[in-house]
Image: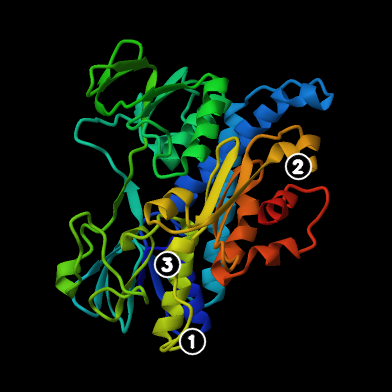
């Protein structure tokens, strides 16, 4: 039994079925994952549209004269079509493997028992193994009353019926900066409320500085050191009040301040599963909860809230529960997961960070190469950003890296493979990469 059909659940189901298991997947929202298909994918689609508008703005330096106009109806249709295509592909894959899909809400009624509430009534199952992959939802603080009109969650913004005239984005983590960039690209005036002294507080300060500079160049207002404490409706929109007395008047407010795991109502106590105060369920290296036959994956596990991590957890769960790897095999190393932020310029990183290494007193070699020296970046008219590579000064083993610039989300894959497999800087240098290409800067950084 798999409760939750997002990236973790559908991969666990597909792989387990391929290995011979009888699998039932329960999903109450959308197969493919609400957070994935209704949050992550639409936001990236809107960012891509904003990117095309930005490209039109850069057309003149490419020797072109171009104009562009945003068509909201066509944009909404495009986003819906992408969601439906990805949803259908997941459903077809599961069905082709003989996985049974149940639309409803699953609840544990015992260590091996699951009750499913569907439109037709309650159906009960007994399962050898249960996988909990119910995902998460936006965190809504007590001081914010969501009306889905002027005060929005991320789910309300793909896109809203109209592009906000002035949007106040509360939260400057990954989601916040992506939305700030996205709506600015689509024509909104944007104010970003930054609770600390830099956007992306958990990222490399040099990386954050490049994004802040670009935001300011684009006209995005940064309200630093401001922690929101209230949102009130006004005749013209909203007022966002901060703890230090500052406030922002805008037409709309968007909350981007974290996620809450969907663990309530799962019947964890009935099955003997232990959760912690924030609602996540601790897991071991096999993604097992404190009850061996009940596995946990995705945001519910409290690990990195990335679709790629959830999918990998699903695969590892299926392999483990089917007895494929009961002894030694490669476990998930969450410290080596690559991640990206789809702003303009893009940001991506993997592995050990420079600040983290210095905080631990670890000796590292840091090399940084700007894209301003890269032929492909100059040809494309976008030399912003850099490649930063972290390696062991004695062995040359690649420990991590950060990339800011065009196609950073794609380029980080090379460093991720190196970090995961213990490759050295020499391994990158000895690779014959394409010329001219942005990837040449990886070779330069490894030299």
Residue under label 2, please give it: 374
Q: Position of residue 122 (x, y in %)?
A: 25, 67
Q: Which residue is mark 3?
A: 9
As drawn, 361 above or below 52: below
**Vertical comparison of 355 with 196: above or below:** below
Secondary structure at badge 3 equals: helix
Label for residue 20? 1
User: What is the crowding at mark 2: few (fewer than 14 residues within 10 Å), some, or many (at least 20)?
Assistant: many
Q: CA distance from mark 3 to mark 1?
A: 16 Å
Q: CA distance from mark 3 to mark 2?
A: 42 Å
Image coordinates of residue 240 in percent, x first then y, are 29, 21
Task: Report if residue 436 is visible in the image.
Answer: yes
Mark 1 burial class by Cα count in 10 Å: few <14, some 14-19, many 20+: few
* Res. 77 in view: no
Name the residue located 43 percent from the left edge and 86 percent from the top edge: 322
Q: Nearer the viewer, mark 3 or mark 2?
A: 2
Vertical relation: 133 (above or below) 226 = below
- Check the picture and name the quadrant holding the N terminus: bottom left
Residue 69, position in %: x, y? 66, 22
Left or right for 127, reference 94: left
Q: Residue at x 71, y 33 (%)?
A: 382
């Amino acid at each position: 039994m798999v409760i939750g059909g997002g990236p973790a659940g559908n991969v666990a189901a597909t792989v387990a079925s391929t290995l011979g298991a009888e699998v039932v997947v329960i999903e109450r929202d959308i197969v493919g994952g609400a957070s994935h298909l209704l949050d992550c994918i639409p936001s990236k689609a809107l960012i891509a549209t904003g990117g095309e508008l930005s490209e039109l703005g850069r057309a003149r330096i490419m020797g072109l004269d171009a104009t562009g106009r945003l068509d909201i109806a066509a944009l909404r249709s495009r986003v819906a079509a992408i969601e439906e295509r990805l949803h259908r592909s997941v459903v077809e894959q599961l069905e082709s493997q003989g996985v049974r899909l149940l639309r409803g809400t699953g609840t544990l009624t015992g260590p091996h028992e699951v009750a499913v509430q569907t439109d037709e009534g309650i159906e009960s199952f007994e399962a050898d193994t249960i996988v909990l992959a119910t995902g998460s939802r936006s965190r809504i603080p007590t001081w914010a009353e969501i009306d889905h009109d002027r005060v929005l969650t991320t789910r309300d913004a793909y896109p809203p019926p109209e592009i906000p005239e002035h949007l106040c984005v509360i939260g400057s983590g990954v989601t916040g900066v992506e939305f700030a960039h996205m709506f600015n690209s689509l024509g909104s005036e944007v104010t970003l409320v930054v609770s600390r002294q830099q956007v992306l507080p958990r990222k490399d300060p040099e990386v954050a500085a490049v994004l802040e500079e670009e935001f300011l160049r684009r006209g995005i207002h940064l309200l630093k050191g401001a922690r929101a404490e209230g949102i009130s409706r006004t005749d013209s929109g909203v007022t966002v009040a901060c703890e230090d007395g500052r406030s922002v008047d805008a037409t709309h407010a968007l909350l981007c301040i974290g996620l809450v795991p969907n663990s309530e109502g799962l019947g964890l106590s009935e099955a003997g599963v232990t959760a912690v105060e924030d609602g996540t369920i601790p897991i071991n290296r096999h993604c097992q909860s404190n009850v061996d036959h009940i596995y946990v994956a995705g945001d519910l596990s409290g690990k990195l809230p990335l679709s790629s991590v959830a999918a990998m957890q699903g695969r590892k769960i299926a392999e483990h529960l089917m007895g494929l790897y009961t002894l030694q095999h490669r476990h998930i190393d969450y410290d080596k997961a690559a991640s990206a932020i789809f702003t303009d310029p893009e940001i991506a990183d993997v592995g050990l960070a420079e600040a983290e290494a210095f905080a631990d007193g670890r000796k590292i070699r840091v090399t940084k190469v700007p894209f301003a020296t890269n032929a492909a970046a100059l040809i494309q008219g976008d030399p912003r950003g850099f490649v930063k590579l972290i390696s062991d000064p004695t062995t040359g083993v690649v420990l991590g890296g950060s990339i800011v610039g065009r196609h950073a989300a794609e380029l980080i894959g090379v460093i991720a493979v190196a970090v995961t497999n213990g490759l050295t800087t020499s391994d990158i240098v000895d690779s014959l990469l394409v010329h001219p290409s942005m990837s040449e800067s990886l070779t330069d950084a490894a030299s």
